[in-house]
Amino acid sequence: MTRLSRGLFLSFEGTEGTGKTTQMRILVERLRCLGYVVTENQEPGATAIGREIRRLLLDPEHQEMAPMTELLLMFASRAQAAAQIITPALERGEIVVSDRFTDSSLAYQGEARQLGFDTVLALHRLVLGTLLPDLTLCISLDVQAGLERAYQRNLSSDRLDRQSLAFHQGVDRGYRKIAESEPQRFRLIDGAGTPDEVAARVWSQVEPLLK
Ligand code: TYD
């Protein structure tokens, strides 16, 4: 088993239907085949408390949920994942791969829900301090094409997936803003092509960090 001296924190981001979860699965498998100890995280969710919060967040019944409530619940789930999963794994020198992290809150709640990046970043500092991924892979695809793909796979029935095209375009705009302000950490990966082609693009970003 290979453990890094300080651990490595990777996250995946993307709008709906970009193949983000498939890419995460391929990367985790590849790292494990190379002998790395990999701990996975998913947001919202991953812990028992996080799963209860996730149910509240995604329940289509809760149409009345205020944007700030949504944001605080995302961070409540993230705080629990940080304490229970992410920080301990990094301290053990493992690689943590997270399906979404604070960048989702910036794009969904900050940009699409218009709470603003400053509000989300202030909350991040308060709740998580300096805990940030070393590298974020944002799988990027035309928003409408992604939504159609997600609908075809019948994955889009939760409260957030059911938002309008304009909402999802706002999310995409949010990701592009992050890519502009943090080009070193946050990489947009072209999601077009076969899963293997996209995986090769992901790997070319991750491999240099393993050395
Ligand atoms: P999920 O089914 O995990 O979606 P996906 O497969 O697209 O990752 O549901 C998570 C939803 O929550 C997704 O629509 C993105 C949204 N979300 C936020 O709005 N803010 C956040 O901070 C996070 C982590 C997720």
Image (tube, rainbow, N blue to C red):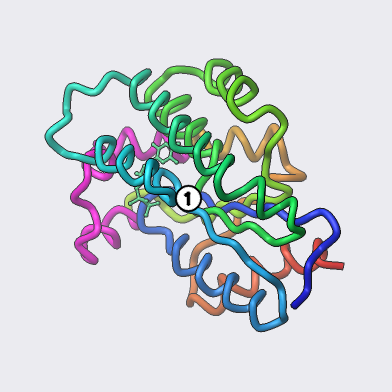
Q: Position of residue 88 (x, y in %)?
A: 66, 49
> What is the magenta range?
145-172
Q: Is residue 36 above or below residue 43?
A: below
Q: Is residue 8 magenta?
A: no
For the point 65% across and 83% down, the residue is: 33
Using the image as rendered, state which of residue 89 and residue 71 is in the foreground.
Answer: 89
Q: Position of residue 6 (x, y in %)?
A: 82, 54
Q: Quadrant of the N terminus?
A: bottom right
Which of the 4 image quarters holds residue 207?
bottom right
Give the residue pinned by disc 1. 14
Quadrant containing ligand 1 reads top left
CB of residue at label 1: within 8 Å of ligand 1?
A: yes
For the point 42% across and 27% down, the residue is: 109
Q: Is residue 158 magenta?
A: yes
Q: Is residue 109 above or below residue 143?
A: above
Please state if 36 lies on the left or on the right of 101 as rendered: right
Which of the 4 image quarters holds residue 39?
bottom right
